[in-house]
Image: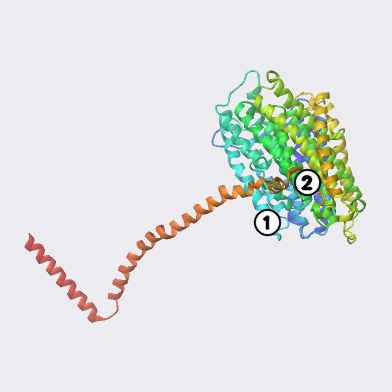
Amino acid sequence: MTTTTAAVLVPLLPFAAAALILLTGRAAPGFVRPLAVLPTLAATALAVLVAVRQGGDAPLTAATVLTPTGDPALPVELALHLDGFAVLVAALVAVVATAVQLYSTGYLRDDPRYPSYAALVSLFTAAMLLVVYTDDLIVLLVGWEVMGICSYFLVGHYWERPAARAASLKAFLVTKLGDVPFLIGILVLASEAGTFRISHIVNGLTSSLADFELERPTLVALLLLVGVAGKSAQLPLHTWLPGAMAGPTPVSALIHAATMVAAGVYVVARLLPVFTSSTAALLVLAVVAALTAVGAAIAALAQDDLKRVLAYSTIGQLGLMAGALAVGSRDAAVFHLLTHGAFKALLFLAAGVLITVAGTGSLGVMARTRDIKRRAPDAFWAMTIGLLALAAIPPFSGFFSKEAILHAAETAALDPAGAPAGVPAAGAWLVLVATLLTALLTAAYATRLWLMAFHDPVSARPEPLPQPPAVSGVTTLVLWLLAVPALLMGLGYRWLPSWLDGTSLAPTLGTSAVATGAAVIGGVATWAAWRRRYEMDEPPDPGLSLLGSRFHRGAAAGFHLDAATTALAARPTEGAARLTRFLDRAVVDTYVRGAAALPGLLGHLVRRAQNGNAQTYLTVLVAAVIVLLVTTALASTGG
């Protein structure tokens, strides 16, 4: 089997599984689990095979025309572009998807809608793999939109719950709000570049001959950035992600932690030369990334729901990846994308076990669940490993990738001449400061989560809860399988550069000391605040102590951005709709009804004359003759 053939089968296998489950799921429910797991597992094996064969060498390409467009020079093509970047991300997507499918066989074993869930997860996996492998912008857009509709259905899986229905609709509408400018940006980019092929666009912008220059690089980059902000939950289109936690926990791990939300970062990384063509676009990206990373970390520090903490954490970590791209370091962004996908999937799946055992996702209630560490020891250790990786504590994977981002920002800020072309110094300084502050805050909320979930005051615990549901063996297996890359993937700094752009990702003493110091300060400050409240016999929420009551309330509500959106956009739109309805009914309909009433009145008068009475007919005839005679006489006299 050739490498390109294997790559074609990678997205086709989960797509075929989704189709078969939808067609046969109700008739043969016993085949749903094998169809959900085995094709995805086979796709994972093939994705790893493709990655090993590609090995960071020259990109492998293959293309065939799918359909012509209005311009003969711009056909839509089924094209593959297999470079080190694409094959590594595809392997991550496939591994996480397989882990989620395995985990779901136990987590959702009693769910009556499991067949549709499994089919949608498989379809989503196929769409994401298509986005990663394709070299055509239109085909990428197809996969992009299929992911969006799968996300809508999966977030609303528990559709009988109002919160799930509202969250799925919000996720769909907010991401579609970004997709419209994204589509326009794709069309403008293709029209200026003369092709939909991503590799041709990138080569045309970066080759020594410079085949072409974009006429409006800032416009194109900003249009694309709006779509990226929607898909990757960046400010101000991030508000859908915390609400999306209403879906099943495995969905949160797959779509809203490791894969779909990373799609926006992936697209910027693939099209980075488009963004580096505009200093203004990179500055906007830096501002958005910095505000998103810091704001999300503060919001995470104030959340009382386990999955919402992880959701805001995801938003913040995506902000760090966007910050790395804003300083021109694709390697650092991709490195953190890979490590984050591993440890965040681990955190969400461990959270699912803890929620099952505690019967709730609330940290406040979970903290009062007696002996939760004893009841779910595997989830406890998985959560601990994941949080250490998230907090960037060496030697866990998050330390190496976050240090790479910090080093890239430091280099661009302190040595503008050595920074990639087009990177603004102001943006580099902004990313540098935001990364340091985010590192401190991330360690703080990770420590808070760990303390509140597992180390509450004994006096605050109620009587033991009933025996919790048994945790499936396959669930435990998945947790430990994901714990390995969460712990060890950071060592990829040794070989990743040869697969990517060649930039060194090795940690340096200075930035490592600063990053680790910031994490230690955040963790120790949180522990001190928790310990002080513990000694005072108060509810042990260190986030409240660190932020203050008023700021804590605002951060817990996501800084009221939903309320601001409602006031600035939703209510004016509703008011305009009400005004339009009033004008339609009171003005337009009045003229329409009047125009219809006049013929009706004339018809009524004519109808009264047609009553079947001969005397009436004779009278009308005589009257008409008299009127004609009089009219004729007057006309003659006037003549």
Q: Residues within 10 Å of mark 1 (few under 14, many from 20)?
A: many
In the drawing, what numbered circle is on residue 165?
1
Residue drawn at point x = 76 percent, y = 58 percent:
113
Q: Residue furthest front?
A: 536
Q: Position of residue 133 (x, y in %)?
A: 72, 36
SS at badge 1: helix
Colour mode of the rendering: rainbow
Q: Which three-letter amino acid code belongs to the residue tagged 2?
A: Ala
Residue 65 position, x and y percent, is: 64, 35
Distance of mark 1 from mark 2, alpha carbons? 19 Å
Q: State which tag comes first along the sequence, 1 or 2.
A: 1
Quarter occupied by the C terminus: bottom left
Compared across the picture, whether 134 is left or right of 619 comes to right
Res 480 visible? yes
Q: Residue at x 93, y 52 (%)?
A: 374
Q: Is residue 627 above or below residue 354?
A: below
Q: Is residue 360 above or below residue 1?
A: below
Q: Position of residue 239 (x, y in %)?
A: 66, 46
Q: In this view of the protein, which residue sits in the foreground, 464 or 288?
A: 464
Q: Residue at x 70, y 49 (%)?
A: 553
Residues 388 and 159: in front is: 388
User: How many discs appear?
Assistant: 2
What residue is disc 2 on? 253
Badge 2 density bin: few <14, some 14–19, many ≥20, Cα 10 Å: many
Place of residue 295 in the rendered image (x, y in percent of width and height, measured from the top left): 70, 40
Examine the rendered structure and indicate whether residue 24 appears above or below residue 13.
below
Residue 502 falls in image quadrant: top right
Residue 343: quarter of image: top right
Residue 180 lies in quadrant? top right
Q: Quadrant of the N terminus?
A: top right
Mark 2 falls on what kind of element?
Answer: helix
Question: In the rendered image of this protein, does residue 601 appear above or below residue 182?
Answer: below
